[in-house]
Image (tube, rainbow, N blue to C red):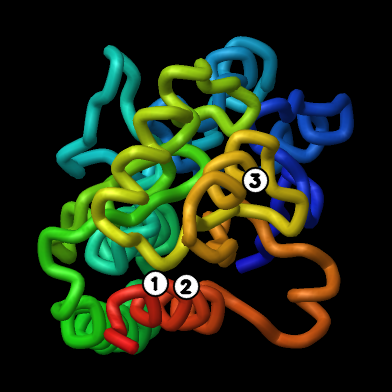
């Protein structure tokens, strides 16, 4: 299988628009894999533009129970390892449907990585157990599936869209909760935290830490061999340290 990502390394999916080159490549492709749940706003445009009746569109979140906040579906499903496993299974089934001659190969590869996702899930469950019922404060609402899976409480400062600006009252409410619960860390999703995140850190005793939403990998991360598993383990360490009592 030859795989190409239409979003450039380190790109921002929320603002991405398909290029002419994307349209040409998809006109010759067998399958287009996308997350769904509203993440890729351009899918309908592709379906109406790409001239390729044989192109199979695979929405990997099909069959998942989606979280809905403010009438919007939360697309960040993959931040739960068990959701990621289901999404991988949907891709595997689609590959077998169009390339049945290699069905056993796809089954074997799926099982290999399904086992790795099961192990990752067990690590999250074990190391986040001390945080049961505690808050995870983040820049925007990307971690609802993770917090639901491991009995934490998501407390985003912004909404689902990283470009969305919170109100002053939103920020004040988060500051009050952080101070009242002596929360140790407030998490940004990039090395350039939003003003809202910096305000919360500045008005509390919490430290700034980082989580990766895994919407894409940078070229540097690819060169150094990072992948879903390595980044998610970094996320696990970053979250778990907030529940260690000093």
Q: Earlier in the sequence, mark 1 or mark 3?
A: 3
Instruction: Please report whichever mark, 3 or 2, sits nearer to the chain's N-terminal start.
Output: 3
Q: Secondary structure at mark 1?
A: helix
Task: State the image coordinates of residue 236 (x, y, percent, origin top left).
Answer: 40, 77
Q: Secondary structure at mark 3?
A: helix
Of badges 1 and 3, the one in the foreground is: 3
| Nearer mark to the viewer, of 3 and 2 | 3
Tell me the CA gap for discs 1 and 2: 6 Å
Instruction: Tell me the residue at 19%/85% (across/down).
Output: 122
Q: Are marks 1 and 2 in contact (CB under 8 Å)?
A: yes
Residue 91, located in which quarter of the rendered image? bottom left
Q: Is residue 162 left or right of residue 144?
A: right
Q: Where 26 sits versus 146, above or below?
A: above
Residue depicted at 62% across the width and 13% down the height: 45
User: Can residue 68 be seen here?
Assistant: yes
Residue at figure coordinates x 73%, y 29% from the top left: 16
> Is residue 159 shown left or right of residue 5?
left
Q: Dot 1 corresponds to which residue?
A: 239
Q: Kindly identify which residue carries mark 2.
A: 235
Residue holding disc 3: 198
Q: Viewer-proximal residue, 196 or 38? A: 196
The N terminus: image quadrant: bottom right
Q: Nearer the viewer, residue 171 or 153?
A: 171
């Amino acid at each position: 299988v030859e795989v190409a990502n239409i979003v450039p390394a380190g790109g921002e999916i929320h603002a991405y628009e398909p290029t002419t080159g994307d349209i040409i490549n998809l006109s010759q492709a067998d399958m287009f894999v996308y997350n769904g749940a509203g993440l890729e706003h351009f899918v309908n445009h592709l379906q109406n533009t790409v001239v390729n009746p044989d192109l199979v569109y695979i929405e990997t979140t099909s069959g998942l129970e989606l979280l809905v906040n403010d009438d919007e579906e939360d697309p960040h499903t993959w931040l739960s390892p068990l959701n990621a496993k289901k999404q991988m299974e949907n891709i595997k089934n689609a590959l077998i449907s169009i390339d049945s001659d290699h069905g056993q190969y796809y089954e074997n590869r799926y099982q290999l990585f399904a086992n790795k996702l099961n192990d990752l899930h067990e690590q999250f469950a074990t190391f986040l157990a001390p945080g049961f019922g505690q808050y995870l404060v983040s820049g925007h609402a990307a971690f609802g599936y993770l917090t639901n899976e491991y009995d934490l409480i998501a407390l985003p400062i912004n909404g689902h869209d990283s470009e969305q600006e919170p109100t002053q009252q939103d920020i004040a409410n988060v500051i009050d909760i952080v101070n009242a619960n002596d929360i140790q860390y407030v998490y940004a999703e990039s090395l350039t935290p939003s003003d809202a995140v910096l305000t919360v850190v500045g008005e509390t005793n919490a430290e700034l830490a980082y989580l990766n939403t895994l919407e894409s990998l940078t070229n540097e991360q690819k060169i150094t061999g990072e992948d879903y598993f390595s980044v998610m383990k970094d996320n696990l360490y970053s979250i778990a340290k907030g529940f260690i009592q000093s």
